[in-house]
């Protein structure tokens, strides 16, 4: 079964009984180590490993309250059904050069409650992934579960005192190929606030020097983006407007991605760029029609094609715009149709969450902020994090930096299509703001995940962004969208 071990300054039979009752396992082995500073925590935990009669061992602080009943059974199940060797309730996907693993909050994962001076609060470092395990390269020492048959390294007894024992243990095993992960279905409350001191800082400097050639460390990212299909999807007729890539093979892959979702009722308008119309005409089929584009910019092509009688009409419930070279990582059509189904009376538009090449989030939504020097800029939500996806949708009046966007025929007509002064998909953001000013809502969907292509620090993007921010700063309605910051 399992062994639970903890270090305490004085005999604490009450806490031992509490662990036995809450873990939900009969005849659980609990090893209490009374240690008033005579030994390091690394030494104590190695003694627990030696004395334990079970392969699964939990090391925990002596000031925890477990908010999940029968939590020990969940730990056993995690180890039985996975190849992870070390589990915790908080950690990170990246340890930076500094060795301060919580330095970049965007990379942190897990959820821990805290209680101090009569107040209780939740420290939510990422969304909950339910019964799944998220890979990390370290777990916080307040709660460490191991399968001792899977670890490669014991606790480093060269680490004195009560700091950095968890960092060295995690890192040594991570570098040895042991899978480390954070779990979410065991919730606990820490009755103290983690604080650093001079001893912690000294150990940080030693660690960062010792592992200088290994840092930063980055864990694998194990995210399954698949979604259940919205059960009423077949009720809705979809128009998908796709811009062709300069490379016909990439365009074929984009079409194949869409076809793999087996959408019940859809048509594709494929727009060529200024040079490849003849080449892609051969891709036409019963669901796909090719339109000649005279420009490389989608907004400019749409400004001409909108006059085509058969381009779009009000028979389509939702119209999706997908820029060239964008990959759909899951069934965005199903997810956004579900949003439309729920919010039909107030629906203006919806955006996917955009992901970068390393699977980190580029943007799930953003705010327009004004700093103390009265300069406007964008603040991207969840930028750089990995696991804050598949977390539902929310309203955001400015939309998102995404190359995939959906709206309705009615909203397109009301907004008079897209502003052709924008060469990039900043035109989508302008469209979203116009919707918000008309009192219909714009939604950002973290369940819909796509790569992004156009929102790089290119000259054309920066030029369009400056135009947009200038427009917002001089428009009385749009000025309400600006949030002030002290930065």
Image (cartoon, rainbow, N blue to C red):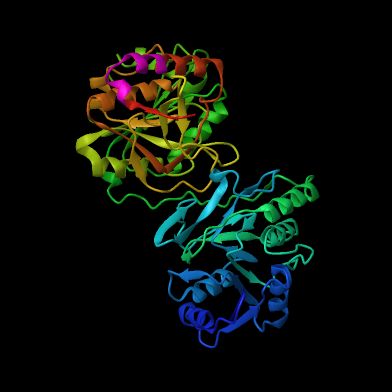
Q: Nearer the viewer, residue 173 or 277?
A: 173
Please state the horizontal and vertical placement of residue 158, each as a whole percent of the image: 79, 63
Q: Nearer the viewer, residue 37 or 444?
A: 37
> Along the horizontal axis of the image, is 347 left or right of 305?
left
Residue at 61% x, 54% y is 136
Q: Give the vertical position of 211 relative to 299 (above or below).
A: below
Range covered by the magenta-colored residues: 469-480
> Along the horizontal axis of the image, is 473 left or right of 107?
left
Please state the horizontal and vertical placement of residue 207, each as a whole percent of the image: 75, 52
> Along the horizontal axis of the image, is 317 left or right of 459?
left
Please state the horizontal and vertical placement of residue 364, each as a whole percent of the image: 44, 38
Q: Nearer the viewer, residue 59 or 230?
A: 59
Q: Considering the image in quadrants, where does the N terminus appear?
A: bottom right
Please state the horizontal and vertical placement of residue 367, each as a whole percent of the image: 41, 31
Residue at 79% x, 47% y is 209
Q: Give the vertical position of 271 relative to 237 (above or below).
A: above
Q: Quadrant of residue 412?
A: top left
Q: Quadrant of residue 169?
A: bottom right
Judge whether residue 439 can be spotted in this image.
Answer: yes
> Along the horizontal axis of the image, is 236 left or right of 29?
left
SS majority, magenta: helix
Residue at 30% x, 42% y is 339
């Amino acid at each position: 079964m399992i062994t639970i071990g903890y270090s305490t300054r004085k005999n604490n039979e009450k806490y031992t009984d509490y662990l036995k009752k809450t873990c939900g396992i009969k005849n659980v082995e609990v090893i209490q180590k009374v240690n008033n500073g005579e030994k390091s925590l690394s030494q104590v935990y190695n003694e627990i490993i030696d004395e334990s009669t079970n392969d699964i061992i939990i090391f925990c602080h002596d000031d925890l309250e477990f908010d999940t009943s029968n939590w020990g059974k969940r730990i056993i199940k995690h180890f039985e059904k996975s190849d992870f060797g070390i589990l915790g309730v908080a950690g990170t996907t990246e340890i930076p050069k500094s060795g301060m693993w919580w330095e970049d909050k965007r990379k942190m994962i897990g959820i821990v409650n805290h209680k101090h001076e009569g107040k209780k609060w939740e420290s939510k470092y990422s969304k909950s992934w339910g019964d799944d395990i998220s890979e990390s390269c370290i777990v916080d020492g307040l709660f460490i579960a191991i399968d001792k048959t899977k670890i490669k390294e014991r606790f480093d007894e060269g680490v004195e005192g009560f700091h950095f024992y968890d960092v060295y243990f995690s890192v040594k095993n991570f570098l040895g190929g042991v899978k480390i992960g954070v779990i979410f279905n065991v919730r606990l409350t820490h009755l103290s606030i983690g604080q650093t001191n001079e001893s912690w800082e000294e150990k940080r400097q030693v660690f960062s020097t010792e592992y200088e050639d290994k840092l930063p460390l980055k864990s694998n990212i194990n995210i399954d983006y698949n979604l259940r299909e919205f059960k009423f999807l077949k009720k809705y007729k979809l128009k998908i407007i796709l811009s062709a890539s300069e490379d016909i093979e990439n365009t074929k892959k984009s079409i194949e991605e869409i076809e793999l979702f087996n959408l019940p009722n859809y048509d594709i308008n494929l727009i060529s760029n200024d040079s490849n119309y003849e080449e892609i005409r051969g891709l036409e089929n019963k669901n796909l029609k090719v339109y000649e584009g005279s420009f490389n910019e989608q907004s400019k092509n749409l400004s001409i094609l909108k006059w085509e009688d058969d381009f779009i009409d009000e028979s389509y419930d939702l119209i999706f715009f997908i820029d060239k070279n964008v990959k759909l990582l899951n069934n965005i059509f199903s997810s956004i149709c579900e949003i439309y189904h729920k919010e039909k009376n107030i629906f203006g538009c919806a955006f996917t969450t955009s992901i970068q090449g390393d699977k980190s989030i580029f943007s799930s939504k953003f705010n327009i902020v004004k700093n103390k020097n009265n300069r406007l800029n964008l603040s991207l939500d969840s930028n750089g994090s990995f696991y804050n996806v598949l977390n539902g949708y929310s309203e955001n009046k400015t939309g998102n930096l995404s190359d995939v966007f959906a709206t309705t025929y009615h909203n397109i007509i009301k907004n008079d299509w897209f502003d052709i002064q924008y060469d990039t998909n900043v035109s989508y953001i302008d469209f979203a703001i116009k919707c918000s000013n008309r009192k219909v809502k714009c939604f950002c969907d973290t369940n819909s995940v796509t790569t992004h292509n156009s929102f790089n620090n290119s000259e054309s993007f920066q030029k369009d962004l400056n135009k947009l921010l200038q427009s917002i700063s001089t428009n009385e309605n749009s000025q309400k969208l600006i949030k002030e910051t002290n930065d």
